[in-house]
Amino acid sequence: MLRNYLIIAWRNLWNNKVFSLINIVGLAVAMAACLLIYVYISHEKSYDNFHEHDDNIYRLVYSATIEGEKKPPQSKVAPFAGEYLLSNFPEIESYTRVNYEGRTAITRYTSDEDYESFHEDKVFMPIHRSWRCFPMSF
């Protein structure tokens, strides 16, 4: 019975080559698109999941409209925003500020006299309270 179904399917594919090719290519493209969307979404959902309290970590962004032109959202906010939000919203337990340093020299001292130094691009440095927000062990 299954053999008969396979023979009929093969004959239909062979007799309608263009139609079959369009359907098979369309199915392959749709499956590839679904796979790419799944990989993208799973990567986005896994971002920063290594933190202990990742469900309670938020990023404050600022968006503005200046002279009728909508500007893209930025993570730059006033320095006092964290302290203001901490004192006025009891739900907020702690905050930290992050500063973009750009290209920075990193130095590691191996002993009192010897050290290794190199430059690193795109360095972000926490300003204060970072260990309360991002507890990590080394």
Image: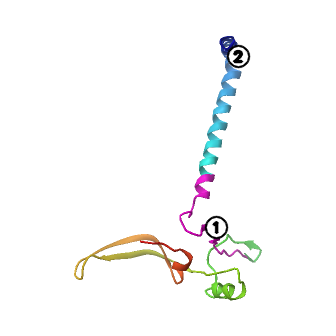
Q: Label 2: which residue?
A: 16
Q: Which mark is residue 55?
A: 1
Q: Residue at x 51, y 78 (%)?
A: 131
Query: What's the amino acid at mark 2?
Result: Asn
Q: Quadrant of the N terminus?
A: top right
Q: Is residue 130 left or right of residue 26?
A: left
Label placed on residue 72: none
Residue sitting nearer the eye, 64 or 90? 90
Please provide percent x and percent y for residue 96.
Answer: 57, 80
The stretch in magenta equals 41-64
Q: Is residue 49 left or right of residue 104?
A: right
Secondary structure beneath disc 2? Answer: loop
Q: How many marks?
A: 2
Specify which label sits upstream in the sequence, 1 or 2.
2
Q: Which amino acid is tagged 1?
A: Asp
Which residue is outermost to the left?
Answer: 113
